[in-house]
Amino acid sequence: MGTSLSGNNKILSFDRPNPSYISPANIPEEYESLLIPAAGAYFREDEEIAVLTQNIDFGPFSLWIHDIWAKKDVVVCPYIPKHIWSLHGLYEDSLHLESPDLPSYLLEEKEFNFFNLPAGMHRIPMAAGKKTLSIHINIEKETLQSMLEEFPGLEPLTKLDRKDAGTLNAYPYNSNPICDFLMEKLLSCKYPAKRAHPYMFRICIDLLRNVATQEAALHEPLMIDSLLNTDNILHLFAYIKEHPFRKHTVSQLGYMFHIDGKKVGFEFKQHFAVSIHDFMHTARMMLIYEIMQSQTSPIEEIAKLTEFPNVMNMMMQVADYYACNRSATYQ
């Protein structure tokens, strides 16, 4: 289904080989709350549109965040200077992607798609008064393949293939509550670059791993027990998110939230595309990293709070999770 909406073309860079960021001082004050200190920024505004673009190049992939406000009917034209694969997510509104080489494609709010994007330009009409948040992680197929030794959970994405422009995935991926949790952490990160890069790099990896798990489970139906236990599973998720310092066995969590201990792990993964153990570990690692950056608590107290046997054990796990040495190498 297409759209008859028209307007002036507005180029939107989906990738830039030679970045030329502007100073945050040149961005109007009303947009300051959206700025991520670790990212380079671009800003443009005229009587028809305002666009704030933020970018971090992590080495193996790059992160792009576009906040777009359409003041009048416009056509946003994403420009891709070279062939890339791009995991794209849309928040706050839905839009249509148009291209002369493929049918119009509906980009739904709170969905992710993995695109094969040859160099060129595409069209996305936006009606006056619309605001959207577009996020994409750009990576080359060969780079994704090379990351499997360290992140084997990404393998389902490497099996995708498409020769022409369009979505690599057969169906959109859901921005489930864990994706939303990761996105919130990503967009609210105010650390300076050196501290932010390992933290944000890992968030991007976890987003890629989540959609990879959704891709692997593409033909697995949501079981009736999982559906009936949705409320309990959501309460369990909220509990882990709000109490990341507590350690529990899966059986204990099942008992606490009235879910069969033998089924709770399966049902959690069906809803969120990640295991309970993985999410508990993610939430705990984030908590430790955030407390460490605040520099308000001795390291021994952090280990005690998060129920690690000792500081050394905690620090080894944090270093492994955030792979700080590797991220520094990529920079």
Image (cartoon, rainbow, N blue to C red):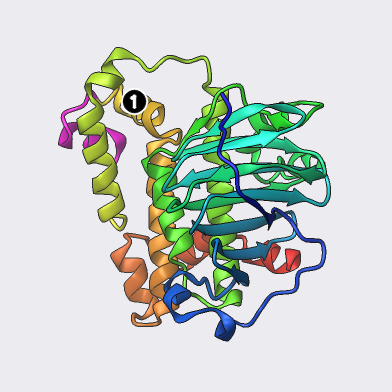
Residue 127 in view of the camera: yes
Q: Residue at x 60, y 64 (%)?
A: 53
Q: Mark 1 points at which residue?
A: 267
Q: What stretch is highlighted in magenta?
A: 248-260
Quadrant position of the N terminus in the picture? top right
Residue 310 in view of the camera: no
Q: Residue at x 31, y 55 (%)?
A: 244
Q: Is 252 part of what is drawn in magenta?
A: yes
Residue 326 in percent (x, y) is at 69, 62
Q: Which residue is drawn at 37% across and 47% down?
A: 280
Residue 313 in percent (x, y) is at 47, 62
Q: Is 257 part of what is drawn in magenta?
A: yes
Viewer-nearest residue: 215 or 51: 51
- Furthest residue in direction bottom, as rendered: 25
Quadrant position of the C terminus in the picture? bottom right
| Left-right relation of 191 to 260 | right
Q: How many marks?
A: 1
| Vertical comparison of 266 with 328: above or below | above
Place residue 60 in its image quadrant.
bottom right
Place residue 185 in its image quadrant.
bottom left
Q: Which amino acid does label 1 sit on?
A: Glu
